[in-house]
């Protein structure tokens, strides 16, 4: 069976950046399972997965625009430290969940200078071309529940 919309595909992967640094891998874990056509994985990788079948191995470089998007400088802002009430010591590198116009989002503290905290709401991988080394391990029809919920269930997918 080839990967197409409303199929659940499972795959092992190693993700690297432009310098070949490993950013993530499924090594030692269950393969990642996703519902094809439901935007469960980045668009560029989903496009590369189309038509593949169990046993296929391939390498694909996904441009930033088809991964986590280009960096947007408008998503970097300076806030007063008082916005972080309840946190004793705000430091660069810390991440927080913030309610934004686009919904809940993770923001990263870039710097703390006096009473000002600079945050970045870009995805940590925004602006980076990503290379995936992939091995497709299984392709099957999605159940009615998976299609209704918009994601794969069970090992490597989401649980309820």
Image: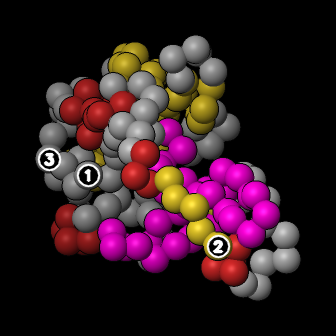
- Overall secondary structure of the magenta stretch? strand
Cα–Cα span, label 3 and label 1? 10 Å
Q: Residue at x 70, y 73 (%)?
A: 81
> In the structure shown, which secondary structural element does the residue marked by tag 2 occupy?
strand
Q: Residue at x 74, y 69 (%)?
A: 115
Q: Where is residue 120? Give x, y as percent.
A: 54, 53
Q: Where is residue 30? Give x, y as percent.
A: 56, 45
Q: Which mark is residue 39?
A: 1
**Residue where numbered disc 3 is placed:** 5
- Height in image: 45 above or below 72? above
Of residues 58 and 68, the one drawn nearer to the viewer in this rendering: 68
Res. 155 visible in picture: no
Q: Earlier in the sequence, mark 3 or mark 2?
A: 3
Q: Residue at x 53, y 23 (%)?
A: 17
Q: Quadrant of the C terminus?
A: bottom left
**Residue where numbered disc 2 is placed:** 80
Q: Where is residue 91? Give x, y as percent.
A: 79, 59
């Amino acid at each position: 069976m080839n990967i197409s919309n409303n199929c659940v595909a499972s795959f092992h992967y190693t993700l690297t950046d432009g310098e070949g640094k490993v950013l993530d891998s499924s090594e030692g874990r269950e393969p990642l399972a996703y519902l094809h056509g439901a935007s469960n994985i980045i668009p560029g990788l989903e496009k590369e997965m189309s038509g593949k079948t169990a046993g296929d191995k391939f390498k694909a470089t996904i441009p930033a625009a088809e991964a986590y998007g280009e960096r947007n400088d408008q998503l970097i802002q300076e806030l007063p430290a008082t916005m972080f009430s309840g946190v004793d010591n705000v430091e660069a590198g810390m991440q927080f969940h913030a309610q934004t116009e686009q919904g809940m989002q993770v923001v990263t503290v870039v710097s703390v200078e006096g009473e000002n905290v600079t945050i970045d709401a870009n995805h940590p991988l925004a602006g980076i071309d990503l290379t995936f080394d992939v091995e497709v391990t299984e392709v099957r029809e999605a159940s009615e529940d998976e299609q209704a919920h918009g994601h794969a269930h069970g090992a490597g997918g989401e649980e309820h």
